[in-house]
Amino acid sequence: MKYLLLLLTVSLFNKSNMDEIYNFSIDTNVKEWRVVNDGVMGGVSSSSLRLSAAGHGQFSGHVSLANNGGFASMHWNKSIPLTQEKKYIVLRVKGDGKSYELRLKGAVSQSESYVHPFATSTEWETIKLPIAAFYPQFRGRKLDILNFNFESIEQLSFLIANKQEEDFELLIDWIGLE
């Protein structure tokens, strides 16, 4: 019992230091997000974003390597101010054991994205990604410019591109800043 109270106290303390920036629920309008697959360059991958019965974001589909394809993504355009105190993006997700990327843009018009890969398990988990570690990338190639250092996030994306043909499913509960 003592251990359970300590765990609950630590969990509440950690959550109170976090600003939630997006929370999926049964009331979420998934049309706030835009799905972009490799069809923009001739590929045939398919994906969708739906709400699960429990109200979680369910990003799922099939990545195909046909026609030089190989990715599926979902984007959310929203201005999220960053302060110096906020050092991490925190995700509450349940994956399928596959690797994904969280991608940021400091301006929607930027050609490059700032990328941080993360691995998933088949259990619900909280993943903390240091904002300063998001590195610049354009069309799968790392760029020789500074890591993410903007005053706001203007676009946030999830992407799967593991260079293999595969089905995938990522459940997203919430996204926060800590």
Image (cartoon, grey):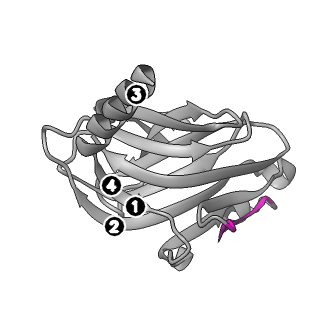
Q: Amino acid at mark 3?
A: Leu
For mark 3, give the secondary structure.
Answer: helix
Q: Position of residue 40 (x, y in %)?
A: 66, 65
Q: Amino acid at mark 4?
A: Glu
Which residue, as the protein is rendered here, is positioned at the far left? Answer: 84
- The image's mark for residue 78 is 2
Q: CB of mark 3 within 8 Å of CB of mark 1? A: no
Q: Amino acid at mark 1?
A: Tyr
Residue 139 visible in image = no
Q: Amino acid at mark 2?
A: Lys
Q: Give how far apart the Cα atoms at labels 3 and 4 are.
A: 21 Å
Residue 53 visible in image = yes
Q: Residue at x 40, y 21 (%)?
A: 2
Q: Give how far apart the Cα atoms at labels 2 and 3 are.
A: 33 Å
Residue ID for mark 1? 22
Residue ID for mark 4? 20
